[in-house]
Image (cartoon, rainbow, N blue to C red):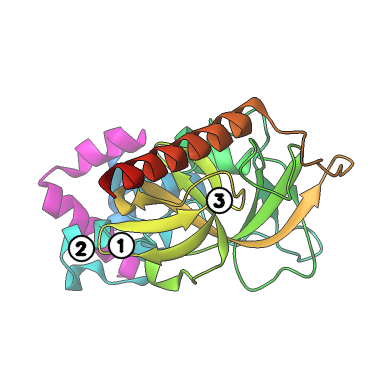
């Protein structure tokens, strides 16, 4: 029997369910499923993905790791226990870089772990980006200078928090903010400290439990003409932040004078 057949047999035993129950969830016959467990047949990719979703175990782990040797709860907590990050290539053998469109950027929060969603994204290839998994994300808002709306930032997938490098910019996919581009400034046990490149915004912390994905900056693609922003051409939000800082500074000075 293969590692895969032993794995799915073990996982079913852990769930304490019958072959028929698993087969019903996969929408196949019990006889067909039984052949996967005894190793006489191998499932096609669509069934393999369904099994991965059913057990919440990545395809890579199902196929290559003897999961009977490890506690199931630890396997489920692995940061790379993912099913959406295979390094796919185009007809020329170049890495395919999926492009998350501007209009559907928030939809990425719902689709990032869905292989069908990822496969449906448009893609491009950049020959100078190799040895990793890359994805292109849209720039929005005013906290990502010098990138304007219409720019795509291409990031390289980062598996764990220990791989983050101080001072390096990343695309963080979080449950609260969605897609956000920030510079990593350090980490504690439960959070990471980040700072926007826009000096009008203060550094802040993101709970590690809120972070779904991390992508290290690799390059950017600008789809619109770059325009220099004049110092007096501030957005209303920037004006508000600037005034707030000035008011806070005045309050601090007044308080210090009263204590003298």
Find numbered disc 1 in the image and state the secondary structure of the residue it sits on: loop
| Mark 2 → mark 1, Cα distance in angstroms | 6 Å
Q: Which residue is mark 1?
A: 78
Q: Residues within 10 Å of mark 2 (few under 14, many from 20)?
A: few
Q: Quadrant of residue 79?
A: bottom left
The image shows residue 39 at horizontal and vertical percentages of: 33, 63
- Residue 50 as seen in the image, left or right of residue 181: left
**Cβ–Cβ under 8 Å for marks 2 and 1:** yes
Residue at image point 76% right, 65% down:
94
**Cβ–Cβ under 8 Å for marks 3 and 2:** no
Q: Residues within 10 Å of mark 1 (few under 14, many from 20)?
A: few
Give the magenta-colored segment's residue range: 1-27
Q: Which residue is mark 2?
A: 74
Q: Residue pushed farthest right?
A: 225
- Residue 69 vs residue 142, the one in the foreground: 142
| Residue 197 visible (yes or no) | yes
Find numbered disc 3 in the image and state the secondary structure of the residue it sits on: loop
Residue at image point 21% right, 38% down:
20
| Mark 3 → mark 2, Cα distance in angstroms | 34 Å
The image shows residue 143 at horizontal and vertical percentages of: 61, 43
The image shows residue 254 at horizontal and vertical percentages of: 38, 40
Q: Which residue is mark 3?
A: 196
């Amino acid at each position: 029997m293969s590692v895969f057949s032993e794995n799915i047999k073990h996982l079913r035993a852990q769930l304490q369910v019958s072959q028929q129950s698993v087969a019903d969830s996969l929408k196949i016959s019990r006889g067909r499923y039984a052949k996967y467990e005894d190793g006489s047949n191998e499932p096609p990719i669509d069934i393999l993905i369904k099994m991965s979703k059913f057990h919440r175990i990545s395809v890579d782990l199902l196929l290559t790791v003897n999961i009977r040797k490890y506690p199931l709860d630890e396997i489920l907590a692995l940061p790379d226990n993912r099913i959406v990050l295979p390094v796919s290539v185009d007809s020329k053998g170049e890495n395919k870089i999926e492009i998350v469109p501007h209009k559907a950027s928030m939809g990425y929060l719902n689709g990032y772990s869905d292989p069908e969603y990822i496969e449906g994204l448009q893609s491009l290839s950049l020959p100078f980006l190799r040895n990793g998994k890359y994805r292109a994300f849209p720039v929005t808002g005013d906290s990502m200078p010098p990138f304007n709306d219409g720019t795509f930032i291409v990031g390289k997938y980062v598996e764990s928090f220990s791989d983050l490098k101080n001072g390096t910019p990343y695309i963080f996919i979080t449950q609260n903010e969605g897609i956000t581009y920030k510079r990593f400034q350090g980490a504690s046990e439960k959070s990471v400290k980040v700072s926007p490149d826009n000096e009008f915004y203060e550094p802040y912390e993101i709970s590690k439990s809120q972070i779904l994905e991390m992508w290290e900056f690799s390059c950017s693609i600008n789809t619109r003409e770059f325009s220099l922003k004049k110092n007096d051409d501030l957005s209303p939000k920037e004006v508000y932040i600037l005034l707030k800082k000035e008011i806070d500074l005045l309050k601090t000075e007044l308080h210090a004078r009263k204590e003298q």
